Image: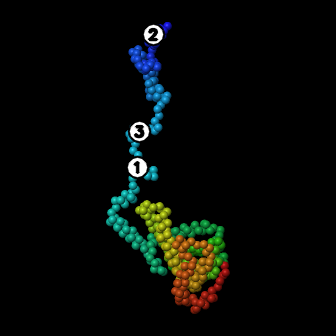
């Protein structure tokens, strides 16, 4: 039995790959090798091309069942570590502005500066009543169109709150306006006054083209026709001096300046806008307000309204102010500074008042002025 078992072991067919299990020294059997080739060819022939591409050959079955996974797959070519700033593409190109700036030469900047200066000087004009020079590139026709558009918007917003023309308050406001209109040389003006019932809003304004809006909240501060004439004279002066067109022109300069500062110095647009606003826009707005105070004071004096009523108006306005920002952060001068500035112009206004034959005595005219007590 032992001999037969030994003989059977020697003649036994070797498994696939021809390696006996547990054998320390592999022994090649020609018949086993031939059998392996036959099995391999039969295994390939019974597979379709797709199965063949997805299947593992017998020699890889062990590794397919227990694959040796790498921690991270790496490409055949070693990858180069690159640093992308703010997730930007490595092939990103500089902007056209920076390209032109890098290639520019000093004489290019000189030419650009001369061109901008020429445009600025070409659009510079003088305010007739004060002699101030300012930049204005908006035509009078465009200003009238903007005024008409704003007029329609205000009418739509105030619908149902506008007092009728036969209302006593509306008649009084219109009476003051009619005395001021001859002193306001505005080309193409179509004067119309509207009184809006809003006791909480102490405001009044005049649009380009002669459209006047007065809120009832301003009337208790005015107290009388002289005070109302000071308010309307100031607002009409804005239109006479074409301040709306000047503000629109300055907005173009502001936007261009903010854009250039942001590009040249690589700073935030909000920071540059705040700086330009504090250093240019707000001071220019306060200059316009002071100019309107001056022009309006002379207009009301020519219309035979007591100019000292403007001083009293701004004194009352100062008392009404609960909290006001510092003047350097405001579009308007403080009420105290406006009152003091008007006091400085008062002597000239009194002379105009007397020269127009309004009253033989300025003091007497002031004492006889009526008060409506709104």
Name the foreground residue: 97 vs 309. 97
- Residue under numbered circle 1: 90
- Is disc 3 surrounded by few (<14), some (14 to 19) or many (20+) residues within 10 Å? few
Q: Residue at x 65, y 83 (%)?
A: 371
104 on left or right of 243:
left
- Residue under numbered circle 3: 75
- Residue under numbered circle 2: 7
How did the renderer colour the structure?
Answer: rainbow
Query: Residue 324: x and y, percent?
Result: 58, 72
| Relative vertical location of residue 21 with respect to residue 181 in this rendering, above or below | above
Tell me, yes or no, whether the two marked residues, 1 and 3, touch with CB atoms within 8 Å: no
Q: Earlier in the sequence, mark 2 or mark 3?
A: 2
- CA separation in Å, label 1 and label 2: 74 Å
Residue 57 falls in image quadrant: top left
Q: Residue at x 44, y 66 (%)?
A: 257
Name the foreground residue: 94 vs 210. 94
- Dot 1 falls on a residue whose secondary structure is loop
- CA separation in Å, label 1 and label 3: 20 Å
Is residue 69 visible to the viewer in this orientation of the structure? yes
From the viewer's perspective, is the residue at label 1 or at label 3 nearer? 3
From the viewer's perspective, is the residue at label 2 or at label 3 nearer? 2
- Is disc 1 surrounded by few (<14), some (14 to 19) or many (20+) residues within 10 Å? few
- Dot 2 falls on a residue whose secondary structure is helix
């Amino acid at each position: 039995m032992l001999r037969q078992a030994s003989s059977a072991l020697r003649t036994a067919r070797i498994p696939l790959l021809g390696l006996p299990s547990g054998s320390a020294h592999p022994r090649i059997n020609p018949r086993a090798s031939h059998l392996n080739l036959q099995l391999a060819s039969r295994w390939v022939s019974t597979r379709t091309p797709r199965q063949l591409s997805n299947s593992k050959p017998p020699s890889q079955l062990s590794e397919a069942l227990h694959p040796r996974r790498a921690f991270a797959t790496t490409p055949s070519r070693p990858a180069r570590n690159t640093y992308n700033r703010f997730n930007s593409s490595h092939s990103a190109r500089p902007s056209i502005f920076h390209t032109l700036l890098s290639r520019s030469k000093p004489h290019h900047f000189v030419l650009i500066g001369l061109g901008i200066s020429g445009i600025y000087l070409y659009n510079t004009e003088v305010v007739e009543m004060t002699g101030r020079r300012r930049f204005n590139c908006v035509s009078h026709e465009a200003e009238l169109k903007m005024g008409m558009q704003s007029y329609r918007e205000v009418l739509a917003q105030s619908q149902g709150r506008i007092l009728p023309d036969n209302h006593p308050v509306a008649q009084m406001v219109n009476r003051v306006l009619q005395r001021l209109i001859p002193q306001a040389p505005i080309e193409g003006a179509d004067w119309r006054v509207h009184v809006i019932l809003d006791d909480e809003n102490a405001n009044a304004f005049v649009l380009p083209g002669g459209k006047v809006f007065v809120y009832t909240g301003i009337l208790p501060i005015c107290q009388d026709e002289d005070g109302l004439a000071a308010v309307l004279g100031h607002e009409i002066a804005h239109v006479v001096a074409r301040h709306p067109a000047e503000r629109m022109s300055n907005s173009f300069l502001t936007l261009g300046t903010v854009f250039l500062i942001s590009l040249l110095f690589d700073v935030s647009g909000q920071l540059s806008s705040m700086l330009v606003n504090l250093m240019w826009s707000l001071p220019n707005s306060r200059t316009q307000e002071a100019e309107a105070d001056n022009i309006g004071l002379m207009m009301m004096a020519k219309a035979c309204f007591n100019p000292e009523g403007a001083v009293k108006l701004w004194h009352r306005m100062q008392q009404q102010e609960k909290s006001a920002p510092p003047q350097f952060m405001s579009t308007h001068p403080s009420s105290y500074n406006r009152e003091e500035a008007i006091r400085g112009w008062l002597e000239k206004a009194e002379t105009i008042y007397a020269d127009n034959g309004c009253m033989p005595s300025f003091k007497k005219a002031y004492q006889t002025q009526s008060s409506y007590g709104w």
